[in-house]
Structures are given as structure tokens and as C-alpha cells.
């Protein structure tokens, strides 16, 4: 399931950063924030996935994580950004 938030005052993408101004703006804009929910089907990996995309990771969990991230990115229409939380903070 993906959730797409739209807001006119605040940038919801800064949710990993806690700050009082962001909290206050989000509170006052509570009724104007819109959320679109997209339900994706259950994803069950198989050997074909692991063989075809073995360049995406060394272990099966890495390939599975790459595939799920790719599906969520396409379903939500948002780009994949490779940045660590440490860099975001």
C-alpha cells in the first residue's frame, strides 16, 4: 500500500526531521492535507525473479527489497532517492 500526501504549506517529505515549526504548520493545515492511497497486490517472489535480477544484490533478501521498492516507486509515481537517514538529518 502506498500513501501520497499533498499539502500546500508544508513538505510532508520532511517527516523524518522533527521540528516544532513543521509540527505547528502540519497541525494548522490538518484539514487541507490530502492523502491518496494505492493498494498493491501481494508480492510473492519466485526463482525467476532471483535469477533475472541477480545483479541487484548478492542475497535473496536484497533482490526482494529492490523489487518491492521498485514496485512502490512505480505505483506512487515518486522517484527512488538513494540517501541515508544520517545524511537527511
Image: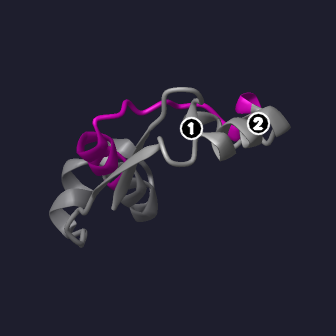
Kindly indicate the quadrant of the structure image that contains residue 56. top left
Observer able to see residue 38 = yes
Chain-order first, disc 2 or disc 1: 1
Give the residue at x 48% y 34%: 7
Picture residue at 60% right of the left edge, 30% below the top: 10
Write the start and end of the magenta stretch as one range. 68-88
**Number of callouts:** 2
Q: What is the secondary structure assignment of the residue under circle 2? A: helix
- Residue annotated with mark 1: 12
Q: Distance between the residues labelled 2 and 1?
A: 18 Å
**Quarter the C terminus occupies:** top right
Is residue 67 positioned above or below 8 on the image? below
Residue 46 covered by magenta stretch: no
* Horizontal arrangement in the rendering, residue 29 relative to residue 25 (left or right): left
Residue drawn 35% across the image and 34% down it: 78
From the image, tell me which residue sits under label 2.
86
Mark 1 secondary-structure assignment:
helix
Amino acid at each position: 500500500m502506498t500513501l501520497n500526501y499533498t499539502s500546500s504549506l508544508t513538505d510532508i517529505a520532511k517527516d523524518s526531521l522533527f521540528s516544532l515549526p513543521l509540527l505547528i504548520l502540519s497541525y494548522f493545515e490538518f484539514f487541507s492535507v490530502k492523502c491518496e492511497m494505492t493498494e498493491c497486490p501481494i508480492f510473492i517472489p519466485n526463482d525467476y525473479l532471483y535469477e533475472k535480477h541477480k545483479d541487484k544484490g548478492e542475497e535473496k533478501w536484497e533482490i526482494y527489497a529492490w523489487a518491492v521498492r521498485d514496485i512502490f516507486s512505480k505505483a506512487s509515481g515518486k522517484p527512488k532517492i538513494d540517501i541515508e537517514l544520517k545524511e537527511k538529518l
